[in-house]
Every structure is written in structure tokens, then in C-alpha cells.
Image (cartoon, grey):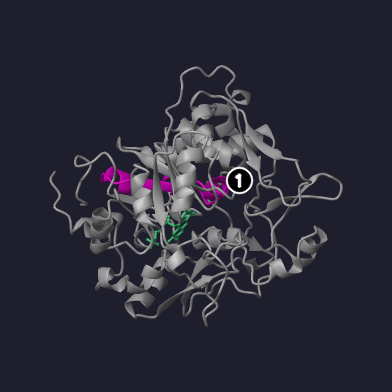
Amino acid sequence: MATDTSTTSTNPLIIQGGMGIGVSNWVLANAVSASGQLGVVSGTAIDMVLVRRLQDGDAGGHVRAAIAEFPMREVGERIIRRYFLPNGRAAGTPYKMLPMHKQVVSIARQQLTMLASFVEVWLAKRGHNRPVGMNLLTKVQMPNLATLYGAMLAGVDVVLMGAGIPREIPGVLDAFAEHRAASIKLDVVGLPPGATETLTFDPREHFPNAEAPLSRPKFLAIVSAHSLATTLARKANGRVDGFIIEGPTAGGHNAPPRGELTLNDRGEPVYGERDLVDLDKIRELGLPFWIAGGVGSPDGLCAALAAGAAGVQVGTLFAYCDESGLAPEIKAHVLAAVRRDDVRILTDPRASPTGYPFKVVDVDGLDSQSDSRVRVCDLGYLRTPYHSPTGKLGYRCPAEPVDAYVAKGGDIADTIGRRCLCNGLAANIGQAQHRDGVVERPLVTSGDDLVSLGGFLGDRERYAAADVIDHLLSGQNIVN
Ligand SMILES: Cc1cc2nc3c(=O)[nH]c(=O)nc-3n(C[C@H](O)[C@H](O)[C@H](O)COP(=O)(O)O)c2cc1C
């Protein structure tokens, strides 16, 4: 059992970082929160994750149990009718797809997103009364408002967002707590000067008579520069409750280095002095902060506390524990390579369609997505809107088929080296799409610390979230 430290501080010492798609699922977040630290579910592409879980038979009935709690009963019933397969899919059958997100989607599509987010948070909160967080990527803009409202319907306690500048999100949370409509600016490539586009979500379209306010979750911004923290603390349109200070060794996406991009001989971005966060400036803001990236160790936690942080946010160690959503065969394969000391992490500046560097696990025998993938764009979470010559908004992704991207006015140079993160990350959690006999391959991400995870792993082949928490806290004098 992990040590319960919840009585020692209102802020957790450990935040289990959000890991999309579906790696930090409700099972993991529930285990972490129940043990007194902060468990965080990923809300990224959670609508796809939900309908695929239903199509895979919803073992244990957890998803359907949570759907039954959703305040709009008919929405849940409709989704179960459409997607639930009691015996799962027949081998090789493709998953039924969802319409891709756009600036404006149907009410039914919004409700599916709300429901999926509700389900994830509801399950993460089941059976204990500790706080639970949700992580979203600011850059994946189009589903975010419905996802946030759905999470708030389930009582999410903390929202954590990075990968962009989430300046408008605190105000969204304030509005949604009172069931008011909220709008955020939609980033559109090539908009004429002075023009703006927005995304709007109005809770009243779904609950015209809602009265009881929802509780307003805390908002933690994930940043990699003190200047961004200062801007958010001063200029966000609502309360920012703290910061995650994430360095470039963290798993998932990283902020690009500041200044001109230079690459090392492995083609990875080189980070330097300018990328170090000035913690004096962070402390001056007077808000709690957690350090993330390469601090998943007892010493890492001690050092963070000594630097004035409230604790650490850890991803990589949790990604390979029993409760995480990573497919068991991928966990076992990577952990076996860790034990052999035969694992490498590449910070790939091209792989992610977002343009941010993305860490990719390189292990012999892991059949990962490569350049030979036939490009198909059918999930579309990373599509960005662009202003088309007709004046309408179009949507494109540099990992989609090259001809299509160029026909939409995209620069062919942007397509080079891009991976389909949507399909690769879905494959990581055992939700690979099948198309005409071809199966999508995984694209596993982890932080640089994966290579040294062997010290923690020892002779074990597997471990639980509680083992991670006990390990991280082992340098602390915990008074229960
Ligand atoms: C598999 C994986 C997926 C991740 N996905 C996300 C994500 O969707 N959003 C996010 O803000 N951070 C993401 N991260 C970063 C973690 O939340 C966390 O900040 C980071 O892993 C901490 O550094 P560490 O990897 O050295 O422990 C991801 C990390 C991993 C390992």
C-alpha cells in the first residue's frame, strides 16, 4: 500500500501527469487519487476512447455503469445502442468512426464528447473522496470546451493544461460553473488581418433549466518558461491556481528550445541555458508549483521540495505500471528492454503534427509506426483550421495524405517526417484501427528517465501505481 500523505498537505506531493491518449485512464487516476496523491485522467480524444471501449465489449461494465449516471439518460442510451457490442468486435473488424471535430459540430456530437469526459472523471472518482484532475492539450482546441464541461458535470477537481497558452481557460471554468456559455479564440491559419474565429459552447443548449452551480475546478497551467507563467498569472481571464514547470526531459510533447533550432547528431533539438526555468521568478508569483520532467525519483522529489515546489508531476514511471492504459504487451516488451538496458528515447522534432518535439521510445522488436505507413486521416484531433480561398474554414493535418494536405494550401515541407499521432497513440492502448487487413501500429512515448527505470524495476517484471508512490515518497518523513 502506498503511504497516505493527504493529511500532511492540502497540495499533493505527487501529481500523476496526464498521459494521452488513454494512458492515464480512470483506472490509474483512481488508484493514485485513492492513495492520497493527485490522479489525473487524460481528456484528449476521450470520445474516441469511449466508443472504442464500448465496441470492445466494456469488460466489467464500468463504462456503462458511469454512462447510467450521466444527467441526460437518453444521450447515454443512444450511445450504447450505437456503439456497444456485448461480445466485442469480430477479429479484424474496423472500429466504427466518429465524425471529426470542427469549429461547429452537432448537438449530438457535443453530447458524446461531454459524456465521454464525464465517464472518465466519474470512474476516476468512484469509491473514494479525494480530488481527481483532468489533463487537456490547449492546442487540440476543438473538443476542449465540451470535454471540460463534461468533466465538471462529474465534479472534476483540477484541470491541468499545457501544450499552448491556456490564457482563456480559467474564464471558461468560471462560466461553466454557472452554466454560462463560453467562447475561446480559435487559432486559424491564414485569417485576413483583423478577422477572428471563435469556438463556443453553451451549457444551456443541453441543460436549459440547470440551476445548481457546478464546483469550479482548480486550474494548473503546464509551462516550460517563467515568462509564460508570469503572463498567465497576470493576464489570464480568471484564476490560475498554480503551475507545473515541465522540462524537456519529460515524456510526450516538449516545448521547442528557445531561439534558433539546432539539432544534435541524432537529429534531436538541443536545449541550453535559455531553456532553464528561473525558479526565483516562479516563487515570486506566490502560487504553488510542481516540477515535471526527470524528477521521478525520491531524490527528485526532495530536490523539488528544497527548491520551494509543492511537489513533482511524474509521468514515465506511471505509464508502465499495472493500472495504466498502455497495452499490456507493449508494457511488457518495453520493461523487458529496460531490464536488458536496451532502450533509447529519441526527441523527434518532426514526428508530431503539432510541430512540438515529441519523445519516441526506440526498442528493438517494437513494431512502431514508420514512414511506410499509408497515410489516412480519420481521427483528426490534430487537424488545424485554415482560412480557405472561398472564405470558409478548412481543416488539415501535416500527417494526412500529402496530396490532400498540399491541395488544402499546406506546404509540402511541413509533411516530412510527420507521424499520425492520433492512430499511433490509439494503438498504444490496444485500440488500433484495422483497415483492409492493415493494422495501425503503436507510437510509444516516454521521458528520458525510461532508460534508467531499471534501478526502480529491479527484478520485477511489473509494478503497481502504489509502488511508484511508495518509491517517490521513500525519501520523505511522512507523518500519518
Ligand atoms: C506516455 C506519456 C504521455 C503523455 N501525454 C501527455 C499529455 O497528453 N498531456 C500532457 O500535458 N503531458 C503529457 N505527458 C507528460 C506528463 O504529464 C508528465 O508531465 C511528464 O511525463 C513528466 O516527466 P517524466 O516523463 O520524466 O515523468 C505524457 C507523458 C508520457 C510518459
Q: Quadrant of ligand 1?
A: bottom left
Q: Is residue 53 magenta?
A: yes
Q: Which residue is mark 1?
A: 141
Question: Quarter-wise, where is residue 202 in the image?
Answer: top right
- Residue lying at the far bottom of the rendered structure: 265
Q: Is residue 110 magenta?
A: no
Left or right of 189? Residue 471 is left
111 or 279: which is nearer to us? 279
Please state the horizontal and vertical placement of residue 260, each as a whole percent of the image: 58, 69
The residue located at (40%, 66%) in the rendering is 331
Mark 1 nearby-residue class (10 Å; few <14, some 14–19, many ≥20): many
Left or right of 328? Residue 32 is left
State whether residue 69 is above or below residue 389. above
State whether residue 118 is above or below residue 455. above
The residue located at (13%, 43%) in the rendering is 480
State whether residue 178 is above or below residue 265. above
Please state the horizontal and vertical placement of residue 142, each as a whole percent of the image: 63, 44
Left or right of 419? Residue 339 is left
Magenta-tinted stretch: 32-60
Mark 1: amino acid? Gln
Question: Quarter-wise, where is residue 134 in the image?
Answer: top left
335 or 4: which is nearer to us? 4
Please state the horizontal and vertical placement of residue 472, each as a whole percent of the image: 25, 58
Helix, strand or loop at disc 1? loop
Please indicate, yes or no, whether residue 429 appears anywhere in the rendered image. Answer: yes
169 or 210: which is nearer to us? 169
Please state the horizontal and vertical placement of residue 343, each as a whole percent of the image: 41, 77
The number of numbered discs placed on residues in the rendered structure image is: 1
